[in-house]
Amino acid sequence: MITSITSNQSRLLDACREKWIAKGLSTTPATLDDAVRIKNGVYKFLGKSQVPVAILNNPIEAWAAVCLFGISRNQVESQVGSQVESQVESQVRSQVESQSVDFIWPWLDGKFYASYCSYLDAFINVFKLRNIPDVAWFLDCANVELIYPLDNICIMSNNFTKLHKNEKGLHNFNGAAVEYASGYKIYAMNGVIVPEWLAETPAYALSFEEYAKITNADIKAEFVKKAGIERLISCGKEIDTYKNYNNEWWNKSEYRLIDMSSVLQGFDYAPHLLMVNQTTKTFHLEGVTPNCKTLIDAFKMRERDNYADYQILDIK
Amino acid sequence: MLRLIKHGEVLFFECKGLPKGLTQIEVQQEYIIVGESETHGNDHRVAVADKLKVKAYKDADGSLYMTNLDKTKVFCPKREKHGESELPESVWEIVKANEFDYVTNQVREVRD
């Protein structure tokens, strides 16, 4: 049992962590030689005959290749087992799965498993544990992304070539957050997958009419962060405000009713409820029906008719 | 006065009792999903430490209700989006907030 670590081991652990973070986020493409070496290691471990390897530009191309080789979903599904959750893997995965019918994320997901690789690497190279199986082949897999070790061919997807992230996940306000060599891109802001137009349109050119077309609250919140709430509501007219009431939670949430009809064609009156998320402190703007003339009307419509009969206990 | 807790678009309205004709929902995990996420799995959940003390129900229209004999938590997997709220012991009706879509001219539930 390990009960303490030396200062040297502590330094080595730091280096190990940095090494695997860098590998997991690397945008350096793997070469064909890398792919052959990784494939050889995988097939040797599996005890399978060596086969050719194909390395494709991105996960969707890799999956298309798997389908081209006539592999049924059932054959591949048996390999699925990865439950790794990370900022990059989960978002790349959800986006690819949403765009590719019947897509299967393979058991060997290479660099997306860098966190587990770092754990193995630390026990082998920092704590010098003996009598453990050879996992060098597994650590080598982190030089590519997805690996489908099929009976007749090994299909891999190569690394993304550009990656933008912040502490919340994939993030780029001015373009794609992830790019692959083939041009496949994933757009995200603060960890929220967003439409291409929202990421590519300059902040100054975003209009409220475009905002009104978004149906998802998280994407709306990212629109507000990018465009700026002051600019977004600058063409609106305040109808009612939390300042007219004496309510602790309304004050905290800074509820305001804003008429946005000046920027929505076809409406003489278009009230929207502006509020501050109590966790993120970001603004949300939601449409309410045109018969809402006060904040109380808005909450009756948003929540329920007898809203005023309830005492707010908490808002998150 | 009855109490209200707002966890994002998911609203917990305290009830004086359960309405008749409800069907109990089998709780299979250590939480109940009370608001599904449309895009990235950050659904709204109620923690279930003891299945005998936290029970969920739905009516014929699919409306959700729950009872908790002990206080419990409302949370999202990504807590940075919505922090935890404490749900005191009581009976609750769980509903989604509405918004008006000026593109389709329709009232719909808020989605995230």
Image (cartoon, coloured by chain):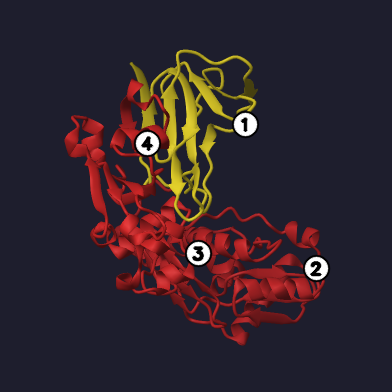
Chain colours: A red, B yellow
Along the polypeptide, which appears first: circle 4 or circle 1? 1
* x then y, percent, for residue A124: 50, 62
Viewer-side label of 3, 4: 4
Circle 3 sits on which residue? A114
Evaluate if marks 2 and 1 touch, with contact meaning CB atoms under 8 Å apart. no
Residue found at x 47% / y 72% = A178
Q: Three-letter amino acid code at disc 1?
A: Gln
Q: CA distance from mark 1 to mark 3?
A: 32 Å
User: To which residue does mark 2 refer?
Assistant: A71
Residue type at tag 2: Ile
The answer to whether mark 1 and mark 3 are in CB contact below 8 A is no
Q: Which mark is residue A138?
A: none
At numbered mark 3, what does the secondary structure look like: helix, strand or loop?
helix
Q: Amino acid at mark 4?
A: Glu
- CB atoms of marks 3 and 2 within 8 Å: no
Q: Is residue B38 left or right of residue A173?
A: right
Residue density around tag 4, few if under 14, some if 14–19, many if 20 or more, within 10 Å: many
Q: Earlier in the sequence, mark 3 or mark 2?
A: 2
Which subunit holds the residue at mark 3? A
- Image spot of residue A313 (x, y percent): 31, 26
Which label sits on residue B28? 1
Whether labels 2 and 1 belong to a single chain: the reply is no
Distance CA(mark 3)–CA(mark 4)? 30 Å
Q: Nearer the viewer, mark 1 or mark 3?
A: 1
Callout 3, which amino acid?
Answer: Ala
Q: Residues within 10 Å of mark 2 (few under 14, many from 20)?
A: some
Which type of secondary structure does the marked residue at label 4 adopt? loop
Residues tagged 3 and 4 counted as in contact (Cβ below 8 A): no
- Identify the residue position indicated by label 4 in the image: B84
Q: Is residue A169 visible?
A: no
> In this rendering, do the residues under marks 4 and 1 share a single chain?
yes
Nearest the viewer among B17 and A59 is: B17
